[in-house]
Image (cartoon, grey):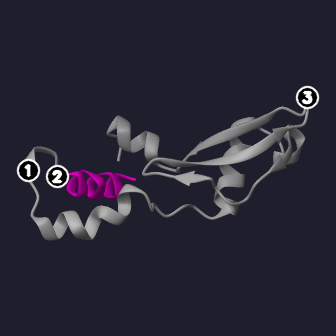
């Protein structure tokens, strides 16, 4: 997360602080961040809810619709009423990084 965010800052060249080669190299992080494997996502969601993923969701798409430096987003359908939702999942360790506990 931290390194991706740093790369995004270099690509955006905030304050004209970064050389052109850094901007070009890191530009891929602006809209093509790598995502975590689904097993990691499933584990995080189940840990947060305290139950199996399919106890809460009728469907949960394994492929994210978006990924960023701190997490990714998946489409899902709630089991209780069939509502279509998006689930934002924060990557492991991100909260500790923000809190400075690393």
Report the span colored magenta. Answer: 1-13
Query: For this rendering, which residue is in front, 17 or 3?
Result: 17
Does the segment drawn in magenta span residue 12? Answer: yes
Q: Residues within 10 Å of mark 2 (few under 14, many from 20)?
A: some
From the image, give the main secondary structure of the stretch colored magenta. helix
**In screen coordinates, is 27 left or right of 66?**
left
C-beta proximity under 8 Å, tags 1 and 2: yes
Let me know if residue 18 is in the magenta part: no
**Residues packed near mark 3 inside 10 Å, few (<14), some (14 to 19) or many (20 plus):** few
Q: Earlier in the sequence, mark 3 or mark 2?
A: 2
Image height of 97 relative to 37, above or below:
above
| Residue 22, image x, y percentages | 18, 67
Number of marks in picture: 3
Q: Earlier in the sequence, mark 3 or mark 1?
A: 1
Discs 3/1, front: 1
Report whether 88 appears left or right of 8: right
Dots 3 and 1: beta carbons under 8 Å? no
Q: Which residue is mark 1?
A: 16
Kind of element beneath mark 2: loop
| Mark 1, other Cα within 10 Å: few <14 / some 14–19 / many ≥20 | few
The answer to which image quadrant residue 30 occupies is: bottom left
Which residue is disc 3 drawn over? 81
Q: Can you identify the residue that label 2 sits on?
A: 13
């Amino acid at each position: 997360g931290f390194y991706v965010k740093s790369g995004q800052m270099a690509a955006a060249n905030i304050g004209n602080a970064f050389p052109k080669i850094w901007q070009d190299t890191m530009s891929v992080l602006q809209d093509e961040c790598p995502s975590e494997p689904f097993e990691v996502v499933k584990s995080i969601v189940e840990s947060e809810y305290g139950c199996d993923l399919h106890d809460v969701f009728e469907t949960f798409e394994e492929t994210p619709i978006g990924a960023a430096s701190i997490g990714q987003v998946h489409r899902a359908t709630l089991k209780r009423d069939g509502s279509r939702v998006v689930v934002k999942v924060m990557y492991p360790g991100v909260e500790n990084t923000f809190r400075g506990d690393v």
